[in-house]
Image: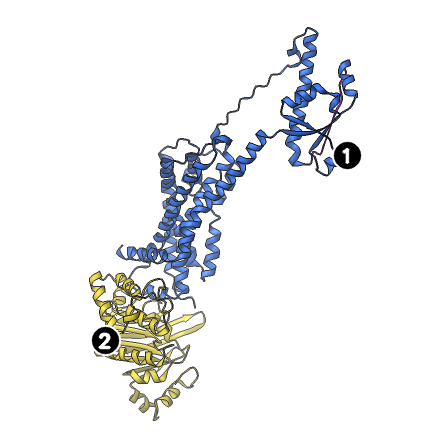
Chain colours: A blue, B yellow
Amino acid sequence: MRALSVVWWKEVRENLRDRRTMVSTFVLGPLFGPVLFAVLIGFVAKTELDRAEKALELPVIGAEHAPNLMNWLGAQGVEAVDPPAEPEEAVRTREVELVLRIDDEYGKALGEGRPAPLTLIFDQSQTKARASIERVQALLQGYGELVARQRLLIRGMDPSLVGPIELRRVDLSTPQSRSAMILAMLPYLLILTVFTGGMYLAIDATAGERERQSLEPLLINPVSRAALMGGKFLASAAFGMVSLALGLTAFSLFAQFIPADRIGIQINLGPAECLRLFAVTAPLAVLAAAVQTGVAAFSKSYREAQTYVTLLVFLPAIPSIVLAINPIKAEDWMYGVPLLSQQLLIDHVVRGEAIGVVQPLMSIAATLLAGALAAAWTTRLYHRESLAVSA
Amino acid sequence: MIEVQQLRKHFGAVKAVDGVSFKANDGQITGLLGPNGAGKTTTLRMLYTLMKPDSGTVLVDQINAFAESNQARRRLGVLPDARGLYKRLSAAENIEYFGQLHGLEPELIRQRIAQLEQRLDLGEILHRRTEGFSQGQRVKTALARALIHDPPNLLLDEPGNGLDVMSTRALREILRGLRAEGRCVLFSSHMMAEVAAVCDRIVVIAKGKVVADGSADELRELTGTSSLEDAFVKVIGTDEGLAA
């Protein structure tokens, strides 16, 4: 135990003196997630606000034939503009999204009670224009229904005759759940800080020592390999936890500047939530450090260790991607799966959903158990003769 | 005292060490001389418990080095072939770290470092970070690190490698001093002059086997040659891989 703490402190002290490790562990790692998150949310907020406020510009040919329709469309936020000289060509070349053509036939037909022709020129294959096309179609449809009701009223009939169905929309999404897509990224970005935080130390303490030829003298000391490995991997875990704490603080500070209510989302990242998130996520630092140290011991060179450990960083992305593509209902067993359980629990906390006691405890216990197994595997690697003797 | 009996170790089809036996006594400097690739480093690695032999035994002051490796390690000071230091720690911190791993008290470590500073002339480099140390400064620091627990037995793998003349002379003095204290000093070398200059006893090793064992005079007598150099060449069978 004493040897373990000696090794732990030496690794921590040595790495605190390494500028590259310090910058990646305590600056770049913790800031990467929050900055990316803030940029994404800023982007989403901007497009949401643009969409809501911006009037739809609709090129109209023959607007003078339908003054009432034009007035009504104007009231619905559609601004009629002058049409291009060659409407079909302009749509094909994506100069405009769509063009409405009103023939002089329109007014006459409307007056005589015949179906009045309106022509909408668009290109369905243009994904970007689809929202505008749908909006204009729905508006024209709505105008048609309005005229129909007025005609029935004039003839003394109940307008509800032409409305056999009344569709009532009950939107159950709360401000929190509307932000699902953006918030789905947050757990991964947070877990990432744990993996990047201890990464350099894990590589340096095993593969780095071997490369610099200090591992052989170290192994000759009257200290068990388990104590050496334990000190090293716990130092890496400590760096991971510090990185996580800094990342959480950064997230929490950034969250205050996000115009969350303007885009109808809410992010719960106050001090109480941060503490809860730390308790749930910190055990991952133990698992990550044990696996990273094992991979570094397994690798034949520093380069090789760097490659493998960097690839490991993408491991926690797997549950994130799966959950983003295929949102599943959380079931009890999932809280016993490392990475997946943190993913779910972080999600719950940030959305302001209540989490019980059993599920976080399950997650912590399962993650620590997996960490212990990984540490046992790494200790076995530390007993290999080839560990120190690379030549 | 170190006793080696019938030590064997192979890597794949290569028999690196093939039945090596010898004895290194207290109060003597024993040289393990042999050309490059003779199996010196592998033999030493088994002596200092880093490698397990396929067969054979190593006794360090009567302690079996494999059955009770931690006991044996406490009685061994080792300067391995790999002399890596922690470059972001000072020389003193490097030495202190190994003292702590040996379970020594902080006060004792401080005393020993002060003694080693005198003996190895560490003065100016003691509190400098080891990054950028010369080869001689590196060896001195690594030697201090190996001596921090005051071991009765010393194993040094090619200690003279890469040292300039001054450092080599200083190293010889240090080895003689350790002998004078009654310690068992065993070092490997492929340089005849180095071995001839300080060793009380020479174990000549070639192709994983001991080919001669005795004092310089005994070796000359045995081979009927007047110079030690001729004696070595005769017992090894070739002068390939040896340096004067």
Quick one: A52 or A292, which is closer to the camera? Answer: A52
Residue highlighted by disc 1: A86
Measured Cα–Cα span from mark 1 to mark 2: 103 Å
Is B234 situated above or below A113?
A: below
Is A39 situated above or below B183?
A: above
Q: Of the residues shown, which amino acid type is indicated by label 1?
A: Glu
Quarter the C terminus of chain B occupies: bottom left
What stretch of residues is rendered in magenta? A112-125
Quarter of the view holding residue A98: top right
Quick one: A187 or A113, which is closer to the camera? Answer: A113
Name the subunit of mark 1.
A
Quarter of the view holding residue B50: bottom left
Q: Residues within 10 Å of mark 1 (few under 14, many from 20)?
A: few
Q: Of the residues shown, which amino acid type is indicated by label 2?
A: Arg
Q: Residues within 10 Å of mark 2 (few under 14, many from 20)?
A: many
Residue B11 percent coordinates (x, y): 43, 70
Query: Is residue B105 something one can see in this rendering?
Result: no
Residue A200 percent coordinates (x, y): 42, 55
Quarter the N terminus of chain B occupies: bottom left
Name the subunit of mark 2.
B
User: Is A162 on the left or on the right of A288, as rendered?
Assistant: right
The numbered disc on residue B114 is none
Residue drawn at 37 percent across, 50 percent down? A239
Residue highlighted by disc 2: B183
Q: Quick one: SS at disc 2?
A: loop
Quick one: B93 or B105, which is closer to the camera? Answer: B93
Magenta stretch containing residue A14, yes or no?
Answer: no
Q: Quick one: SS at disc 1?
A: loop
Is A184 situated above or below A301?
A: above
Residue drawn at 41 percent across, 55 percent down? A21
Magenta stretch containing residue A115, yes or no?
Answer: yes
Whether labels 1 and 2 share one chain: no
